[in-house]
Amino acid sequence: MAAPQRSAARKFVKRLQDGDQAAHLITLIFAASVFLVTVFLIYELWIHSSASRAKFGLAFLFAKSWDPVAEQFGALPFIYGTVLTSVLALIISVPLGVGAAIFLSELAPPRLSNTCTFLVELLAAVPSVIYGLLAIFTLVPLMRQYVEPFLKKTLGFLPLFTGPAYGFGYLTAGLILAVMTFPFIISISRESLLAVPREQREAALALGATKWESTWQVVVPFARLGIIGSIFLALARALGETMAVTMVIGNDPSIHASLLAPGYTIAAIIANEFNEATGNLHPAALVELGLVLFLITMILNAAAQLLIVATTKKGSIQD
Amino acid sequence: MGRTRRRNMLNNVMLALTGVCTFVTVSILFVILGFLVWNGFRSLDWNFFTKLPLSPGETGGGLANAIVGSGITILIAVLIGVPVGFLGGVYLAEFGGKTFPMFVRYTADLLNGVPSIVIGIFAWTVVVVPMHTFSAWAGGFALSLMMIPIGLRSTEQFLRSIPNSLREASLALGATKTRTIFTVIVPAARQGILTGMILGVARIAGETAPLLFTSLNNQYWSEKLTEPTATLPVMIYKLAISPYDDWHRQAWAAGLVLLGLVLIANIAARWVLARGTAVQRG
């Protein structure tokens, strides 16, 4: 009875000595660990937010007050601030980014295009705390002294531009986020524009379209899924951005209509209060905010990936 | 005739505007560099690299502990992140079937998109809470999580770009699959893999949010890896939001050093890649 077992064991040892099975197993463990860690991350966020989820339920998302002393926690001011700053950022960075991407893919000679893209991608590598540092000492005084008084004087009849000019607030945070997001929009939009087959441009030009008409009415619509994907990706980045925003948002947990007013974002409140949070409920509420942020960015990232894959595939098949 | 002129004018105006967009976006990099060099260079001196931070009111001092602390946390992150990213990438490119690698790839992309502050919360729950202390380990662990997806996907991508004929030639000579992978395929892709790893390090070197409640901060030298550890990005944050002029000065100097390191790492990574493709072509 022992003989077949021993030969099976010997076979197994032999296979391990060949190394293939062993290498397969070892690399499998490392690959699986990436999968497991991510699943574990979601599980930990879920468990550590349980106290807050049990107490507030779904109302957490719509409650306006954030008072650690009275143990009243509501996410609305932070969700509002996060969405508002990100939308402001996109209003600035989308036209600027798509415009630059059009120039780099349609007009610039390859050498200039590659150099500029390289420089723009370096901009994406600048750490966010450095954007924050620059913003505190250059952008904030500039906003307080010149830009915000000017906006109040010219557009002050709108509720968007009222209240004192602090320099810290939604608008400044939105501006910084715009600078942080357009590298993503430029480099991915440029890729999708470059993937548009040349025949499309030639056909439009042959029909008598100007360069701009061929670009705007033929090339850009052809690449639109990739461009939208790049915008989603930029939005996901902006929503999750922590340091630069924390340093300029003004840290006021309430909702203001004015863009000049100080506010708060999800990432900023976690960065500021997580260390000082005591008791059971306060940390749980912060973790739940983290969970909300995670879910939003996860959905946006997945959507962006699908759109970008869809366009690059379409371009390469027709080439 | 009027219509044609209008179309031509629109053409010229819009094309010029796209040029302006490019100019604005590219020049922002130079504005950033300019401000940092201008403000940082004035405050940078030898003390910055050798002395400890002083209390408010005293002038002078440096951030030696933060520079060393950053080095230590990044080293821990590399020691965890590089093996996991590399070997996981080898599995995806060389061993994997269909379904399971797809899951791993999806979760790696998911992990890559997780906001850095959420990574910080996760590292806090799994390292800081059980150890009952903020530590360099926790900071390094948090940073490794940000590095793994980059290393994993770039390793996979560059291994896949190696032509199959190379694998077949090696197998035909009687080499085992493992030997083929580690003596033929990986060396052929090493430039690309190295680029991915350097870009990973460049990304985590400037990360602040995951360190805020993992490695925390420290005014003094950390003697053990289980103590709160100062790092450059966290120091920049703390100094910048402080009310003291001398600390602002130090923040600029630290910002210049950090940005210099990150940009050099990025440029080095591209250089390695460019050289690699040149060698392969020639």
Image (cartoon, helix red, strand yellow):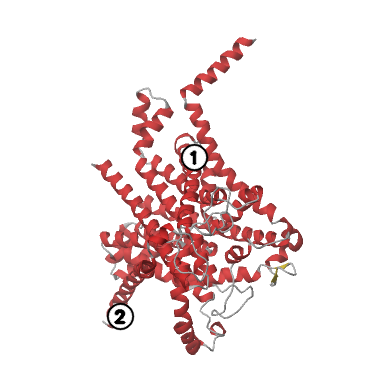
User: Is residue B216 among the parts visible in the rendering?
Assistant: yes
Disc nearer the start of the sequence (1/2): 2
Mark 1: which secondary structure? helix
Q: Position of residue A318 (x, y in %)?
A: 36, 52
Per the image, the residue denoted by label 2 is B6
Type of amino acid under label 2: Arg
Q: Residue furthest left?
A: B282
Look at label 1 and name its amino acid.
Answer: Gly
Q: Position of residue A138 (x, y in %)?
A: 43, 75
Query: Residue B191: where, in percent of width, then height?
Result: 35, 43
Q: Indicate whether B157 appears above or below A45.
A: above
How far apart are the alpha carbons under marks 1 and 2? 58 Å
Mark count: 2
Horizontal side of residue A12 vs A200, given as left or right: right
Q: Give A18 or A141, whichever is nearer the viewer.
A: A141
Which residue is located at x 45 percent, y 35 percent? Answer: B94
Of the numbered discs in the image, which one, if any, rests on residue B88?
Answer: 1
Quadrant in which the C terminus of chain B is drawn: top left
Q: Chain of mark 2?
A: B
Which corner quadrant holds the N terminus of chain B?
A: bottom left
